[in-house]
Image (cartoon, helix red, strand yellow):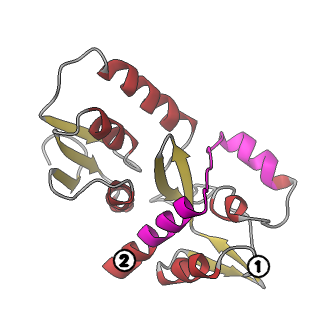
Amino acid sequence: MSGTHDSALHFIVDRLRAHGYRFTTPTPTTHARFVAHRERARDLRDVLGWTLPFSGDVIPPEIAEALLVADAIEERGEMFLSRVRVSTLNEDYYLHSAYPTTQQDAVFFGPDSYRFADFLRAEFTDIPPRTHIVDIGTGAGVGAITAARAFPEAYVTLTDINPAATRLAAINWVANNFPFGGVMFKRGDGLHV
């Protein structure tokens, strides 16, 4: 995907912030139970959080257009379905794969992401400042972004074997107001990348 696609995804996150969008990703079981009782989306949370089919009038036109530009929407008869979800964790917004995450290159975000961020924040209070942080298997970038908030002077390297993950992690990095200076995104499975 090109820079235009990524810019459209940045735009979506910016607009969601402006609309006060919030979504806490539940377990897959809870998600399945919720969507089993609702046929179609009623609002932005249903479209970009719960991944429910929607008609064009449910979301603001600029967000619908950005989903099209980002190639992040598919037609389902007379309805549409988002290919991405957006979840919030504290003040941060994370793009990740739509539910269900059955694609081979799915980028996961869920309850473990929240627990991981909580664990890191708790551990970071007891260690001295760091100059370089490496997030191996970054996924949507939760570990790296949490670490960068705790150690804003550190250089951060995000790695993942999934190119879709490093791409979304890079988008999430910028969408959460971190500059591209002092960060590197690498495809790989460890420290040797």
Seen at 30% across and 35% down, the residue is 147
Apparent side of residue 186 relative to residue 1 in the rendered image (left or right):
left
Seen at 48% across and 52% down, the residue is 93
**For the magenta stretch, what is the residue range?**
9-35
| Residue at mark 2 | 1
Choose top left, top right, bottom left or bottom right for residue 57.
Answer: bottom right
Q: Position of residue 152 (x, y in %)?
A: 22, 39
Apparent side of residue 85 relative to residue 130 in the rendered image (left or right):
right
Q: Position of residue 88 (x, y in %)?
A: 54, 47
Q: How many marks?
A: 2
Apparent side of residue 173 relative to residue 100 in the rendered image (left or right):
left
Distance Cα–Cα, label 1 vs label 2: 25 Å
Looking at the image, is mark 1 or mark 2 nearer the viewer? 1
Choose top left, top right, bottom left or bottom right for residue 28.
Answer: top right
Q: Secondary structure at mark 2?
A: loop
Q: Position of residue 66 (x, y in %)?
A: 52, 79
| Identity, as a three-letter code, of the amino acid under mark 1 | Ser
Does 30 lie within the magenta span? Answer: yes
| Identity, as a three-letter code, of the amino acid under mark 2 | Met
Apparent side of residue 79 relative to residue 21 in the rendered image (left or right):
right
Q: Position of residue 190 (x, y in %)?
A: 21, 41
Give the main secondary structure, helix, strand or loop, of the magenta stretch: helix
Q: Which residue in the rendered view is the most extreme toward the right?
A: 37
Does 69 lie within the magenta span? Answer: no
Considering only vertical position in the picture, is 144 above or below 14?
above
| Residue at mark 1 | 55
Residue 2 appears in view? no
Answer few, some or many: residues within 10 Å of disc 1's Cα (few below 14, many 20 plus, some between 14 and 19).
some
Toward the viewer: 151 or 76?
Answer: 151
Answer few, some or many: residues within 10 Å of disc 2's Cα (few below 14, many 20 plus, some between 14 and 19).
few
Toward the viewer: 61 or 79?
Answer: 61
